[in-house]
Amino acid sequence: DIVMTQSPDFLAVSLGERATITCKSSQNLLDTSTNSHCLTWYQQRPGQPPKLLIYWGSTRDYGVPDRFSGSGSGTDFTLTISSLQAEDVAVYYCQQCANIPVTFGGGTKLEIQ
Amino acid sequence: QVQLQESGPGLVKPSQTLSLTCTVSGASLDSGGFYWSWVRQHPGQALEWMGHIYHTGNTYYTASLKSRLTISLDTSKKQFSLRLTSVAAADTAVYYCARARKYFMGVDFDYWGQGALVTVSP
């Protein structure tokens, strides 16, 4: 199974500041047929189901604000929120889509400092 | 707009069977390209993929639940279901149904239900 490791577990950032979350996979997530990395990011606000934010490592889903960006390659990936807004308070999860079983990271809880 | 909604008992006794149904609107369950999935989340914990089913009836289950889990599909009712036998307190969780986008080997999830809290308790 592909193990996904997120850091940090908890992050407090001031409004308007940058937030950075990292995700490391135990295997290379490069899909050679598309030359893209099969890594998806989700946002889960309190009491809500997860919401797809970014797929293929760096493609924002429809309607996701451009302050959210994804980057990385191989086994190391990053989710960046360029200017934190109050509505971004949530737990963020990475997930590999390269193989079954599906595996998620442990989550990063993001709060306002 | 694709919508999913879980339904089923919120309380199940230990050793009994947990059954949930997901009703889908805005999408066809018998079209290719998507799996229909169950993901659970223990209180305060991370997401755990349980398994999914394709419109052909092919199923994939996580190894730790494979002996107790059955996922089935009723395309005419636009529903898919989860059945987890011999439950214990450790199965207390929020259960989500989700649509999974199919890639070469794996999936990710583009639409989710609101979740159903199931508590296992005498």
Image (cartoon, coloured by chain):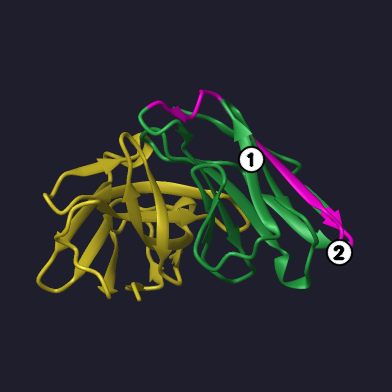
Chain colours: A green, B yellow
Amino acid type, label 2: Gly
Question: Which numbered dot is residue A71?
Answer: 1
Residue B91, compared with residue A85, is above or below; it is above
Quarter of the rendering occupied by the N terminus of chain A? top left
Q: Is residue A67 left or right of residue A37?
A: right
Residue in front for this viewpoint, A79 or B23: A79
Q: Position of residue A78 (x, y in %)?
A: 67, 40
Q: Position of residue B116 (x, y in %)?
A: 43, 70
Which of the 4 image quadrants contains residue B58?
top left
Label 2 or label 1, whichever comes before in sequence order: 2
Near mark 2 (Cα within 10 A), the count class, few <14, some 14-19 or many ≥20, is few
Q: Which residue is mark 2?
A: A16
Q: Chain of mark 1?
A: A
Amino acid type, label 1: Ser
Near mark 1 (Cα within 10 A), the count class, few <14, some 14-19 or many ≥20, is some
Label 2 secondary element: loop
Question: Which numbered dot is residue B52?
Answer: none
Q: Is residue A43 left or right of residue B12?
A: right
Give the alpha-carbon distance from disc 2 to disc 1, as whole Å. Answer: 20 Å
The region drawn magenta spans A12-32
